[in-house]
Image: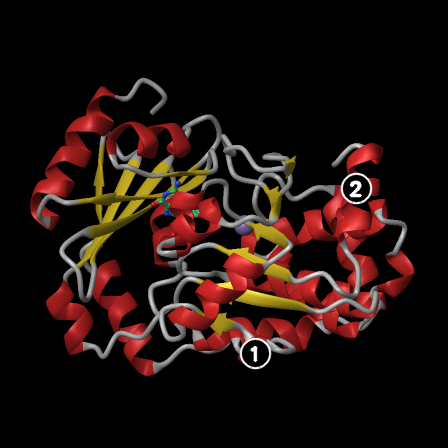
Amino acid sequence: MFTPAELLEINTLLTPESKIVILTHYNPDGDAIGSSLGLKHYLKAKGLLAEVIVPNDFPKFLKWMPEAKKVLIAEYKRKVAFDLISEADVIFCLDFNSPSRIGLLGDWLTKAKAKKILIDHHQQPENFDYVYSDTVIPATCQMIYHFIQAMDDEKLVNKDIAECLYTGIMTDTGGFRFRSTSATTHRIVANLIENGADPAMITSNTWDTNTVSRLHLLALILGRIEVVKDGKVAVLYLTREELKEYGFQKGDTEGFVNYGLSILGVKMAAFFMEDLYEDFIKISFRSKDDMDVNQFSRKYFNGGGHINAAGGKSLESLQDTIVTFKAKVEEEDNL
Ligand code: 5GP
Ligand code: MN
């Protein structure tokens, strides 16, 4: 948590006259949107206005969240986003650890005169004016709750805040299953339910949103899943042609990589996908126990993230990327 002195300073920065912006990472997920909107609703409950800006669009299954439709998507409104960031007094940076994770906003953030406040749970955060980083906490949404507690404002938690924070904790813990899910996480979730978060509604709005084409895509990749390194590494992939053929929409492949990890004996799964528009391969890594995919991805695939969930990129062809990957896992001692 921020030190008491930092919390006092942050408090003095947050006035009704302050221009407050909340930023989150490229390809925003449930935790990114949940923490950003959760913080916005908290600030609103304190009588403060804030603008949430994301680098690019986010999946439809997150748009039910209160005020999700008011999130400013910078790829569609560059000038407005640029002006807001340049003129801000305070910028909250949520669920990312480096300006390089927010696409075109990174440069604007670096040059902005605002005080920058980081709240994030990824490994190896870069420098910001105020840093609350804890890589053991499963979701940035949980950190927003701790921030609200540290500001002595738990009484302000209302239904809007509760729904947003619940969503991010639910998605980033894979439904309260992943390793860093703690008793504290569950206590906070209990408070969120008491303050208006409805688990059945949130689960159904967020997860029961399959389209037939998404299930067909899933069937396709499950049908050719490959296991290497003595059954310890699962490999999944999708080509651009396949994405086009199945009418891919943002968010359609979310969670696919976890099927690889669910195979008995598998310690690491990798999902390779050609980008629909640009010439690169987006990679998702997931792992169990001490297999550190943050380090692996940083070392070989220009990426990073958490110990057990990370992402990366490759400029090689899909086939070459997979060949390189298989060679690297063969050399890996932790598998
Ligand atoms: P996903 O596989 O769901 O896209 O990402 C898993 C985790 O890794 C997320 O926490 C995400 O923020 C992080 N991540 C994904 N792609 C990248 C990347 O290219 N660079 C870094 N540093 N982190 C990434
Ligand atoms: Mn997160």
Q: Is residue 29 above or below residue 182?
A: below
3D distance between C-alphas at marks 2 and 1: 29 Å
- For disc 2, the marked residue is 9
Q: Is residue 29 left or right of residue 89?
A: left
Q: Position of residue 285 (x, y in %)?
A: 35, 43
Mark 1: few/some/many CA within 10 Å (<14, 14-19, 20+)? few
Tell me which corner region of the image, top left, top right, bottom left or bottom right, holds residue 34: bottom right
Q: Is residue 262 above or below residue 18?
A: above
- For disc 1, the marked residue is 70
Q: Is residue 95 left or right of residue 322?
A: right
Kindly identify the amino acid type of the residue bearing the numbered disc 1: Lys
> Mark 1 or mark 2, which is nearer the start of the sequence?
2
Give the structural element (helix, strand or loop) at label 2.
Answer: helix
Kindly identify the amino acid type of the residue bearing the numbered disc 2: Glu
* Residue at figure coordinates x 76%, y 43% from the top left: 183
Q: Is residue 300 above or below residue 223?
A: above
* Residue at figure coordinates x 87%, y 64% from the top left: 156
